[in-house]
Amino acid sequence: LAVSDLFGFDPDSILKTSARARIGIKEVLDVICDKVPPPDSLADDDGTILRAKVIDSWFEPRRGVVCLVRVLSGAMEEGDRISIIDGGQARKDSYSVQEIGLVLPHRMRTKALSRGQMGYVIAGLRDPREARPGTILTLQKTVNTVVGNEMILPPSMGKNVMGQQSVLYASVHPMEGEGFDELQAAVEKLSLNDTGLEIHRTAGSSNNSNGGGPFLGPGLKVGFQGLLHVEVFRQRLLDEFDLEAIVTPPKVPYTIEYLPSKSYKRPSDLPMIEVIEDLIQWPPAGHRFKV
């Protein structure tokens, strides 16, 4: 009663429910359907143009990428050919929708989704990074209408989405020089289910510590979300591929902007803004700069 008085609840309207004891589950869902309003439609929605926002995506070895989507307008059916819009630009590739359904939490195939519904879509994509959260799915035949007419699109989540911006980098090398191809294949497979990895090949022939120096040979420069991400990456390499790799100490990139200085004039052929990862690249005494 004290809580009812504090928040202005009607004591008779409070439902007794317990997920563990399976009490009152149906009643809670019925009340949600009755009292929670449906999503608002887009202002330019005429019911014919599909716009589905990707909420999440993951990779499954047998089916490829599974996208969890929310349909903002129009409808999608199995057999439709869809295109991806990212940042207001349509990509060239298109995909055939193979399976559509709801997540309940098990998958229930429905063969179609319409406005206001959330469900899963399997369309033959092989890399989850092709359908990052925030991208829009639309029918191939109407993609030019959506982009050309500047129809309403929800704002992209951009690089703030988990998995799109690395905060530190490490160089990864095989224990033996001839094991690079095996290591590269394993890391690429890991990246299918871990979009937080950012992978670049390094020559490993430089004299500084970037890329592992001249002694470790060719390797991969991998971007991570944090130190825990690095440890999970190493453990997955060992558990899933039986590979032990040399991982150099992670480095955080810093963007340096040089400022005018009376004691030092920076040569005109050198950039005023640069990204450094090594302490040996840090500006020497006398330079004025901001990070």
Image (tube, rainbow, N blue to C red):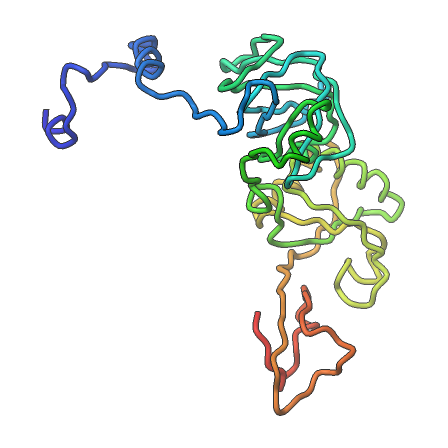
Number of numbered discs overlaid on the protein picture: 0
Q: Quadrant of the N terminus?
A: top left
Q: Residue 245, percent across and down?
A: 74, 45
Residue drawn 70% across and 17% down?
Answer: 97
Residue name at image x 64 percent, y 23 percent: 66
Residue 243 is drawn in which quadrant?
top right
What residue do we see at 72% from left, 73% from top?
271
* Residue 171 horizontal side relative to residue 112, left or right: right
Asked whether residue 71 is in view, the answer is no
Rendering coords of residue 52 (x, y %): 58, 25
Residue 237 versus residue 278 in the image, above or below: above
Q: Quadrant of residue 182?
A: top right
> Hey, which quadrant is residue 262 in on the image?
bottom right
Q: Can residue 132 be spotted in the picture?
A: yes
Q: Residue at x 56, y 34 (%)?
A: 152
Q: Quadrant of the C terminus?
A: bottom right
Image position, residue 59 (x, y; %): 67, 26
Q: Give the percent coordinates (x, y) of residue 31.
A: 30, 14
